[in-house]
Every structure is written in structure tokens, then in C-alpha cells.
């Protein structure tokens, strides 16, 4: 008489190195793809807590200042090209120096925190009102433009789009460029 065996679950088998390697590679890819959004969360928290040191970890201030100065320089060059008076050209050149100093003053952790909140950066250092992380750096869109570039679009007070360009730096991301809506300054 044959005995019927009861169902016995298979004993667990050892996971192979190949399977572990594939799993580790897959997790690394997911982390790398999600990393800009993780950085956005950390950036918002740093801005909301007014932590200038933490904010500086996520923003390359010299690169951002140079970017904004370059954008303003293009606007000023267009304006000077349209001027017919020598005094107007001289005034535009003088205003360029003032704008450079203004940008150096405004492109600080407090100034960028204000811009991230959709506010005017002038007088930003005096604003000590408490802020929740969800109120800072509200963005409409965030997307990759390349393997090492990521763009975040935020509205300003006039609902114009400001583009914050982030660049991969090994395993972290930093804002290296801010593309301002300079259409209102466009003289065309």
C-alpha cells in the first residue's frame, strides 16, 4: 500500500550572488533616479528652517550669481544697443555695476529662500516668519533634461516661471543655474 505524502513546502534555497547583484544594481538605479526629488525635499526643509549652511549644500551660490549676472547682462546689452544717446549708454554701463552688486547681495541663502517662496528677495533677511516646508519651493514641474541635469519650475508672485537647474555632483545634486523670467525687461 502506497502512502500518500503530505504536502511539504520546499526548503528555502540560498540566494545566489548573481541575484543579489541584480537586486543591488536595481536598487542603485532607483535611488539615482529618485535622488533629485530627495534633494528637493531636503532643500525645502533647509529653506523652511532658515538653515543657511544646509541650504549652501544644495546651491552653488557662485555659479548661480554668475548665471543671473549673465542673464541681466544680456538684457542690459539689448537695452544699450537700442539707445541713441551717449549719456544713456553711459548710464546703462553704470547701472550694470550696480546690478552686479545687487545680485551679489540678493543671491544669498535668505534671498534665494525668498525667491523659492515666490517672494521678492529685497529685504528677505528681515523676514523671520515661521515657514512650513510645504510652503517653500512649491514647484509646478520637475523633470530630467539629461542624465546629469534636472530642472524644477516654480512660479513667482506674477505666476511667471522660474527654472532652477540642478546638476549631478557624484551622488548629490546642486542648483547651478536659475533661469529668470526676464521677458518684462525685454525691450523688443
Image (cartoon, helix red, strand yellow):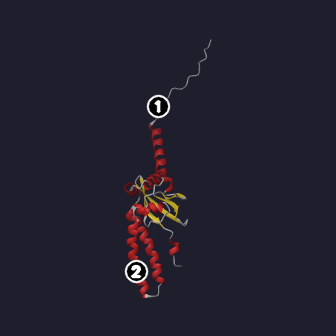
Question: Where residue 49 sits in the image (x, y, percent)?
Answer: 42, 53
Instruction: Specify the farthest residue to the right.
Output: 1
Question: Helix or strand or loop: what does disc 1 sit on?
Answer: loop
Position of the N terminus, as image quadrant, is top right
SS type, badge 2: helix
Q: Residue at x 47, y 85 (%)?
A: 83
- Write down the quadrant of residue 122 in the picture: bottom left
> Which residue is identified by label 1?
14
Residue drawn at x 51%, y 69% is 181
Image position, residue 91 (x, y; %): 41, 82
Please give the name of the residue rendered at 38% of the width and 76% of the height, measured from the top-left corner.
Answer: 97
Q: Residues within 10 Å of mark 2 (few under 14, many from 20)?
A: some
Question: Looking at the image, is 78 positioned above or below residue 155?
Answer: below
The residues bearing labels 1 and 2 have C-alpha atoms spaced at a distance of 73 Å
Residue 188 picture location, percent across and down: 53, 79
Count of residue discs: 2
Of the residues tagged 1 and 2, which is closer to the observer? Answer: 2
Please give the residue where the numbered disc 2 appears in the rendered image. 93
> Image quadrant of residue 96?
bottom left
* In the image, farthest residue toward the top: 1
**Mark 1 burial class by Cα count in 10 Å: few <14, some 14-19, many 20+:** few
Amino acid at each position: 500500500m502506497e502512502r500518500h505524502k503530505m504536502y511539504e513546502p520546499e526548503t528555502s534555497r540560498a540566494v545566489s550572488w548573481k541575484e543579489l547583484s541584480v537586486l543591488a544594481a536595481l536598487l542603485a538605479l532607483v535611488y539615482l533616479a529618485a535622488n533629485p526629488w530627495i534633494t528637493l525635499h531636503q532643500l525645502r526643509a533647509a529653506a523652511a528652517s532658515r538653515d543657511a549652511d544646509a541650504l549652501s549644500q544644495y546651491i552653488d551660490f557662485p555659479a548661480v550669481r554668475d548665471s543671473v549676472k549673465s542673464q541681466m547682462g544680456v538684457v542690459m546689452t539689448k537695452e544699450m544697443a537700442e539707445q541713441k544717446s551717449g549719456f544713456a549708454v553711459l548710464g546703462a554701463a553704470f547701472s550694470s555695476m550696480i546690478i552686479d552688486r545687487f545680485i551679489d547681495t540678493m543671491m544669498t541663502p535668505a534671498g534665494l529662500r525668498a525667491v523659492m517662496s515666490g517672494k521678492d528677495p529685497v529685504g528677505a533677511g528681515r523676514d523671520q516668519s515661521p515657514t512650513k516646508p510645504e510652503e517653500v519651493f512649491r514647484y509646478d514641474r520637475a523633470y530630467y533634461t539629461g542624465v546629469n541635469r534636472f530642472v524644477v519650475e516654480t512660479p513667482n508672485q506674477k505666476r511667471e516661471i522660474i527654472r532652477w537647474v540642478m546638476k549631478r555632483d557624484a551622488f548629490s545634486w546642486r542648483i547651478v543655474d536659475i533661469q529668470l523670467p526676464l521677458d518684462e525687461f525685454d525691450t523688443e
